[in-house]
Amino acid sequence: MNILVINAGSSSLKYQLINMQNETVIAKGLCERIGIDGKFIHTTHDSRKVSEDCSFPTHKEAFEKVVKTLTTGDASVIKSMDEINAVGHRVVHGGEVYSETVKIDENVVSKIEELKAFAPLHNPANALAIRACQAVFPESTPQAAVFDTAFHQTIPDFAYMYGLPYECYEKHGIRKYGFHGSSHRFVSGFLAEKTGRKLKNLKVISCHLGNGSSIAAICNGESIDTSMGFTPLDGLLMGTRCGALDPSVVTHLQKELGFTPDQMNDYMNKKSGLLGIGGYSDNREISDNAYRGDEKAILATAILRYGIKKYIGAYAAAMGGLDVVIFTGGIGENAADIRRDVCFDMEFLGIEFDEPKNSLPETRGQFVKVSKENSKTEVWIVPTNEELMIAKDTKELFGL
């Protein structure tokens, strides 16, 4: 049984075709520069590749190319579309409407479009891609929407509400929603399964660290708080995002710099973070420059590490204890120095860190414990797999 997982942007379409019998990726690829000039990249499980310039006026042509490549030619992996049993779409924002994966119908697509004010860069693109997919695939192929925000719908009101007039929540939906839900849910569930424990008996802090980063407090299997808020801008310093700010900074800078709201939003989302302070959005370049003594790079990475440590302490307090800290995402899985510095001097939380093991090259991107055997609180590297989580949700929804 095969499930096609779709992650669409306004000008891109990422996909994975996953064999759910053994949960392996049999093909994956990317259609990019949709509506511009078009580029297509496709790779199979046995390393057959396609890379070519294409004309993608809309997402519909991109889906047609994906289906054609999956089913015909030298890089095909299935014989026909009939071998795709379902399609699972990543959707960024489900608001308070969706707390679980749902079957896509016209009402769902319309609701995703209605929520565009909460995710203007993502939800319109998600809805556009869904409609394009529906135009290419037969109606008999079931399609599911899996929401980034759904996992965090268990956060209590005192944790998701802001100190604004209550009507801001009632009339405008202003509250914390949280993101990276599929990743946090996958890594916490994977850890519990692989270590033979029940997630409902664990207090876990999941650190998804990458170009976009968020931390989640997962108590007894449910998210009770997370660092991202109304949008993915809140929380930690990120690649190009500023993270948490005093709100007055926003209004002050708008006046000082003469920014419109859209310009200010762009400034905080695309020109800040590691890039704004250290000159690079990639943590690897920041770390290299910090090692060479660049003062701004040193400051940027120090802000990031301090922020992660602070959230771990806060969420341990919120849960009344801590059993496991998980590092995941591109930075979390690969940056041994960040894991080391975050876990330094955290014995008061029961963390006995195994730095020699943490520093081994073979730990990079692997499922491995990097705390000592006698550590009361365990620290694990858990590679994330949001696409597999989406595929699992889709499979379960349709009873496949």
Image (spheres, rainbow, N blue to C red):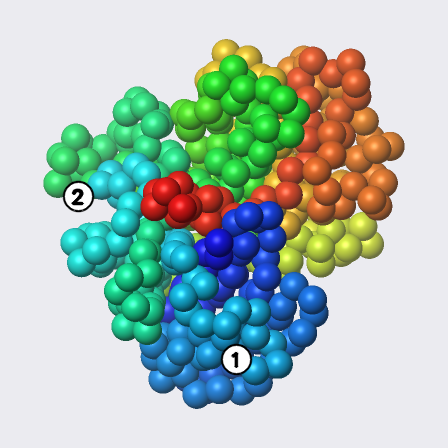
| Residue at 14%, 35% in the rendered image | 170
First reached walking from the N terminus: tag 2 or tag 1: 1
Cβ atoms under marks 2 and 1 closer than 8 Å: no
Which callout, 2 or 1, points to the residue nearer the camera? 1
Q: Is residue 300 above or below residue 79?
A: above
Find residue 16 and report its horizontal and vertical position in percent.
Answer: 52, 61
| Residue at 18%, 58% in the rendered image | 106
Query: Count the marks: how many?
Result: 2
**Mark sitting on residue 83:** none
For residue 325, side relative to residue 147 (left or right): right
Is residue 204 or residue 27 the one in the foreground?
27
Can you identify the residue that label 1 sits on? 72
| Number of residues whose C-alpha sits closer than 10 Å to that of mark 1, classed few (under 14), some (14–19) or many (20 or more) | few
Can you identify the residue that label 2 sits on? 172
Is residue 264 or residue 109 the one in the foreground?
109
Amino acid at the residue labelled 1: Thr
| Number of residues whose C-alpha sits closer than 10 Å to that of mark 2, classed few (under 14), some (14–19) or many (20 or more) | few
| Residue at 33%, 51% in the rendered image | 145
Q: Is residue 1 visible?
A: yes
Q: Is residue 31 visible?
A: no
- How far, Cα to Cα, is label 2 from label 1? 48 Å
Give the SS element for disc 2: helix
